[in-house]
Image (cartoon, grey):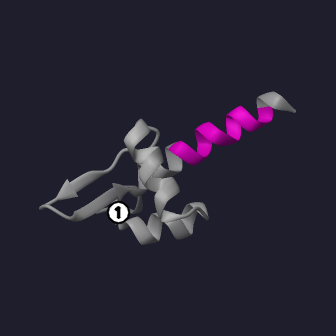
Amino acid sequence: MNLSDELLTINETCKLLKISRPTLLKLMKKGSIKGFRIGKRVWRIRRCDVEGYIEKNDENENEHC
């Protein structure tokens, strides 16, 4: 498994993005960040999806400057 295939927990993703858990859950619900459930309660997010979200938001911020 390479680094981009790494699976992150909710907490790891929150730390990486510097956002709260409720904010991350809202982003996942909107579809801005893709996550998937393992079992009934365990969520995982692919690192590559988080990196894609970061890149997309960086591009949007640069357009406003």
Specify the farthest residue to the front: 22
The residue at 82%/30% (across/down) is: 64
Residue 9 picture location, percent across and down: 36, 68
Residue 62 picture location, percent across and down: 79, 35
Quadrant hosting residue 43: bottom left
The amino acid beneath tag 1 is Glu
> In what quadrant of the picture does the C terminus appear?
top right
Residue 7 picture location, percent across and down: 32, 63
Magenta: main secondary structure: helix
> In what quadrant of the picture does the N terminus appear?
bottom left
The residue at 40%/62% (across/down) is: 3
Specify the farthest residue to the right: 65
Specify the farthest residue to the left: 39
Of residue 55 and residue 18, the one placed in the foreground of this image is 18
Specify the farthest residue to the top: 63
User: Which residue does the numbered mark 1 point to in the structure image?
Assistant: 6
User: Left or right of 44: which side holds 57?
Assistant: right
The residue at 78%/28% (across/down) is: 63
Q: Is residue 54 magenta?
A: yes
Residue numbers of the magenta segment:
53-62
Of residue 22 and residue 39, the one placed in the foreground of this image is 22
Quadrant hosting residue 59: top right
- The correct choice, above or below, for 30 with respect to 38 in the image is above
The residue at 36%/44% (across/down) is: 34
Q: Please rate how many residues cluster around mark 1, counting C-alpha atoms within 10 Å: few if below 14, some from 14 to 19, many from 20.
A: few
- For label 1, the SS is loop
Of residue 21 and residue 59, the one placed in the foreground of this image is 21
Of residue 23 and residue 54, the one placed in the foreground of this image is 23
- The correct choice, above or below, for 63 with respect to 27 in the image is above
User: Left or right of 49: which side holds 55?
Assistant: right
